[in-house]
Amino acid sequence: MRLLCVVLTVILGAGCSSTAVPGGRVDRILVGDADTVVVYNREPIQLPVRAVGKPGHAVDTLRPHFILLSGDSIPLSETGIIVCLKPGLTTLGVTLGSTFARAVVRCRPVRSVQMAGPLNLVVGDSLQTPLQVRVLGLDGQPMGGVAGKVTVSDPRVVKVEDGRVIPLSAGHSWLWFAVGDESAEIIVHSYGPVAALDQLRPDDHGAVHADLRTGESRQWSLPPGHLVIAIRTDRDVAGGLGVHVEGANCETMTLVRGGFACLSRAGASISVSRPATSHDGVVRVQVLLRLTRA
């Protein structure tokens, strides 16, 4: 993901009204990354230009001049403001003083960005959680090979590395993925392993686990108050799981995948069981709980 962030930063770089430092001759003009710019925006943007002089020499401050040379007809101003209203590929020329360069612009306007979430993760868990993103083009079809930028609201809680979402500490964080003018966001809840769920305090995120064989069950005591509970397994379970909450008023929540919102009383508990008819070995079951302030 680090490379993707760099690419988008180049595309959305600052304008080119001040491309150099007063002084000598321009030796080379760079447009975008290696003289290629991929534009995901539908709104007008300024093409980034950098003037390079000979080593040890400053270069002239001049306003670059842009023209279309070949390829698709794409709206382009003389100052380098481009508008990608549809997919296309064009070659343009840019002049800075007496120096001329060519660059390729690939228009890939984005219609929308979608992310799978929210996510419930456990600190130190061996389960891999990929960042699932779909970027749709103007035709509504998924786009491949898209460079986007990931932003995390609280990097102490979660990070994104090599396309995976990795929990670092208990808590929650918002996660954004932006491409061009479009973006999507999800909330990530990160749970820390605890010895007992009934010892949690408001705003705590705690997780317990049990390895269940066919016909086995496990019970945990719950703290009183407003709870959000989620269940995770290390793989798909044939026949599903039996989940029973005693001493609490619970309802399913669409905002928490596989979870419940509960108002529990003192002495409440949750039990998870595996059907006696299942025959697919041991399954690790995680019970994730956060105590809210209501």
Image (tube, helix red, strand yellow):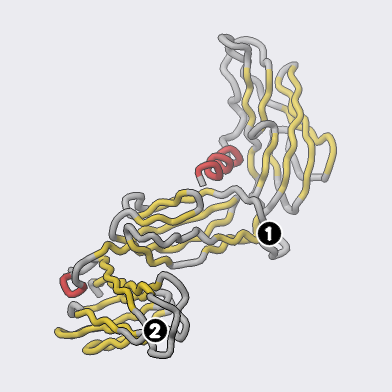
Q: Residue 53 versus residue 219: which sits nearer the camera?
A: 219
Mark found first going from the N terminus, 2 or 1:
1
Q: How many neighbours does mark 1 have within 10 angstroms: few (below 14), some (14-19), or many (20 or more)?
A: some
- Report the amino acid beneath label 2: Leu
- Secondary structure beneath label 2: loop
How many discs mark residues in the rendered view?
2
Q: Which residue is at a point 69% across and 32% down the rendered structure image?
A: 35
Q: Quadrant of residue 63?
A: top right
Q: Going 38% across and 67% down the picture, which residue do you hit? A: 120
Task: Name which quarter of the figure residue 173 lies in.
Answer: bottom left
Residue appearing at x 60%, y 34% in the figure: 15
Q: Secondary structure at mark 1?
A: strand
- The picture places residue 130, in percent across and down from the top left corner, at 49, 59
In screen coordinates, is 151 left or right of 193?
right
Q: Mark 1 is on which residue type? A: Gly
Q: Residues within 10 Å of mark 2 (few under 14, many from 20)?
A: some
Disc 1 target residue? 137
Q: Position of residue 264 (x, y in %)?
A: 22, 83
Residue 175, quarter of picture: bottom left
Residue 223 position, x and y percent, is 18, 77
- Image quarter in which the C terminus is found: bottom left
At horizontal 28% and vertical 87% (from top left) the residue drawn is 245
Give coordinates of residue 157: x percent, y percent.
33, 54
Q: Is residue 83 left or right of residue 50?
A: right
Which numbered marker is on residue 241? 2
Q: Nearer the viewer, residue 130 or 22?
A: 130
